[in-house]
Amino acid sequence: MALPKQSEDFPAWYQQVVRTAELAENSLARGTMVIRPYGYALWEAIQAGVDRRIKQTGHSNVYFPMLIPQSLLDKEADHVEGFAPEVAVVTHGGGQKLEEPLIVRPTSETIIWATYAKWIQSYRDLPLLLNQWANVVRWEMRTRLFLRTTEFLWQEGHTAHETSEEALKEARMILMDVYKAAVEEDFAIPVLTGRKSAAERFPGAIATFAIEALMRDGKALQSGTSHYLGQNFAKAYGVEFLGRDGGTHNPYATSWGVSTRLVGGLIMAHGDDRGLQLPPRLAPFQVVIVPIYRDAERTRVMEGVDKIAESLSGIRMKIDDREEHRPGYKFNEWELKGVPLRLEVGPRDLDGEVVTASRRDLPAKESKSTIALSELATEVPKLLEGIQASMFRSAQEFRDEHTFRPSSYGELSEILRDARGFVEAPWCSNPDCEAKVKDETKATIRVLPMDPEEPGANCIVCGNKADENAVWAQAY
Ligand SMILES: [Zn+2]
């Protein structure tokens, strides 16, 4: 069951953690994934936090069908060009060839905007602020569990607005108040926020904003995107409204999503050589209680465990009373599964009216403390909060240590080739410079500032005047 070391083979480490922690496995159709109960509980906790924030910011959930007439996709040129290569098409149904093939949604702008044409007539119908939780299919050639699978789960928000300012404000608000907030507060992962360059934009978007997180191997993971779509989709699908001025206008659109990819991000941002490390706010079990006894002591210890469990109401908890495994085996397994806090309860603990607590986020030597039984109800929530905060701090320290500001192109390309982390440097906005870096190092521009500012230095690639600082990294 020993994991490969992260420093020796990070991809193998990742694959084995996903499998041995029982998060997910490959399924029968190529590139598809079965999410197992422990992995799905994690996804449900992620979903709950994102959904709460989506609703708090004024959006409602809806559900649109998975099958979309092919002709709908063809109406928005950039969009169809971007997605056509990875679209799955249904040609037969009920044993007969279909008159018009149906595509399996790779994303839902097309069906949603075709429907908005019926729902939006007047400025009084705006803004329209909707979101759906759904599965989508993109025919991926190279797949990896959670990070890139042919079918994945996500939420996609689709909003319509009277003005471009309002739509842009919405796209940025989602990025900051929903995605950044969820990933930093729930996942304990600091993120960079910013705009994408034209090369990295969503097909059909005018501006794409993203949050980017740093993984333990020095690569970036795009963890959420929010797009300002202008009037492209409204025009393509004939959505018009009567404005306050009595004239006819096309509304402005946004779309935005996060997916099961976030589970991969959580694994790679916090995991270590012992396995997963889950932040208390998302952990399916925040606490695992491991009773320790010899046969004669069993009844007494288990009575103690039951009392302890009672005093921890409101905490997501697992009592591991399996007879067939020894405590040491259980410790390893729950460490691998990333449970934030372990409580050990043996006869000696009960004699002293304490339990032994062990934190997953600290090295083994520093991780243990004892908690008086009478203080469990207050101390355990406090410890969990402390773990959440310290996980964020250590992820932030890791990111700071892996953020570089090189002064020459040679230095920049060396750091990027080795995937040592984020590299911030001035860029002239010329796609040729961006392409050169990509060709030579595989790294791409992850984000540009939300509001560009002249860096007061020349482009690190070509030496011409720079417009802004770009952040580069190798990425998943
Ligand atoms: Zn340049």
Image (cartoon, rainbow, N blue to C red):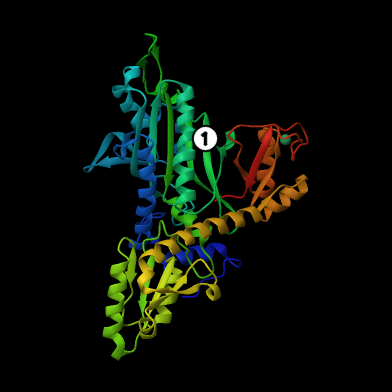
Decide: is 241 above or below 152: above
Decide: is 370 above or below 52: below
Secondary element under disc 1, as helix, strand or loop, is strand
Decide: is 204 above or below 359: above
- Residue 448 visible (yes or no): yes
Provide residue 27's location: percent of width, then percent of height.
36, 59
Q: Amino acid at mark 1?
A: Thr
Provide residue 260's location: percent of width, then percent of height.
41, 51
Q: Which residue corresponds to the image point at 47% horizontal and 74% vertical from the top-left?
A: 369
Q: Which residue corresponds to the image point at 37% horizontal and 36% vertical from the top-left?
A: 108
Provide residue 282's location: percent of width, then percent of height.
40, 56
Q: Which of 162/208 is in front?
A: 162
Instruction: Name the quadrant where ligand 1 sits.
Output: top right
Label 1 sits on residue: 208
Q: Is residue 446 left or right of residue 467?
A: left
- Residue 419 visible (yes or no): no
The residue at the far left in this view is 94
Q: Is residue 44 left or right of residue 278?
A: left
